[in-house]
Amino acid sequence: MALVLQAHILVFEVALDSTKIARFTPVWEAVPVLLAVIAPALIAPRLASWEALAHDRLAWRTGLLGAVTLLAPSTIPWIAHLNLPPDARWWDISWNVLFLGSLALTATAVLGRLGGPATGLAIYAALIAVQQTAPSAAASLPFSGASTNLQPHPGPASAAAVTAIAVWSVTLGRSRRLRLRERND
């Protein structure tokens, strides 16, 4: 959080195609996205130890922990906006963080502690690449940041979050396939 507040208006310029407008990635987006895609991998080992208890309330606890894991990084842009210029796009960036965190949470439950964050980071890099190289295609993505898509996307981000929390709750952070694979290793 201190890094985001200290960075103020620091942005990273992504220019994969020099003939198009660069995609500017602010620190108040990059840092929360990194936290959002890594956080599920950090809580997954703890959830695995809960599984041995086989108690019905674990699904509720797991779902609550998944929701907190999604919401905590998403609030960083809200707090950062106190130190940003009035025209900073912190609201749509919060939805971007929630969307990517949801994808990483689901991927962590299905692919494991390494596969989840790797999937989240790969999707983030792919979305930024599409936004910079094909702004017309980026206009239809549920992720803001392209010059043609600067509005928030609460619908897709909320749907992804509800789906991720449901998957996380049902699997207790690890899918059946993942548990079988870990037992066979």
Image (cartoon, rainbow, N blue to C red):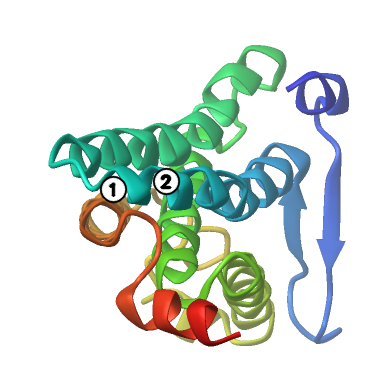
Q: Which residue is mark 2?
A: 95
Q: Residue furthest top?
A: 82
Secondary structure, mark 1, is helix
Choose top left, top right, bottom left or bottom right for residue 175.
bottom left
Q: Residue at left 69%, top 51%?
A: 34
Examine the rendered structure and indicate whether residue 3 appears above or below residue 164.
Answer: above
- Residue occupying the point 69% across, 37% down: 28
**Of the residues under marks 1 and 2, which one precedes in the sequence?**
2
| 113 horizontally vs 96: left or right | right
Q: Does residue 6 appear left or right of residue 142 in this picture?
A: right
Q: Which mark is residue 141?
A: none
In the visual, does 26 lie left or right of 7?
left
Residue type highlighted by circle 2: Trp
Q: Is residue 158 above or below residue 60?
A: below
Q: Who is closer to the viewer here, 80 or 34? A: 34
Rendered view: 73 above or below 145 = above
Q: Quadrant of residue 67?
A: top left
Q: Position of residue 17 (x, y in %)?
A: 80, 87
Report which residue position mark 1 lands on: 154
Q: Amino acid at mark 1?
A: Pro
Q: Are marks 1 and 2 in contact (CB under 8 Å)?
A: yes
Q: Which residue occupies the extreme left position in the image?
A: 56
Query: What residue is shown at x 13% (from left), y 42% (from top)?
Result: 56
Camera-nearest residue between 27 and 44: 44
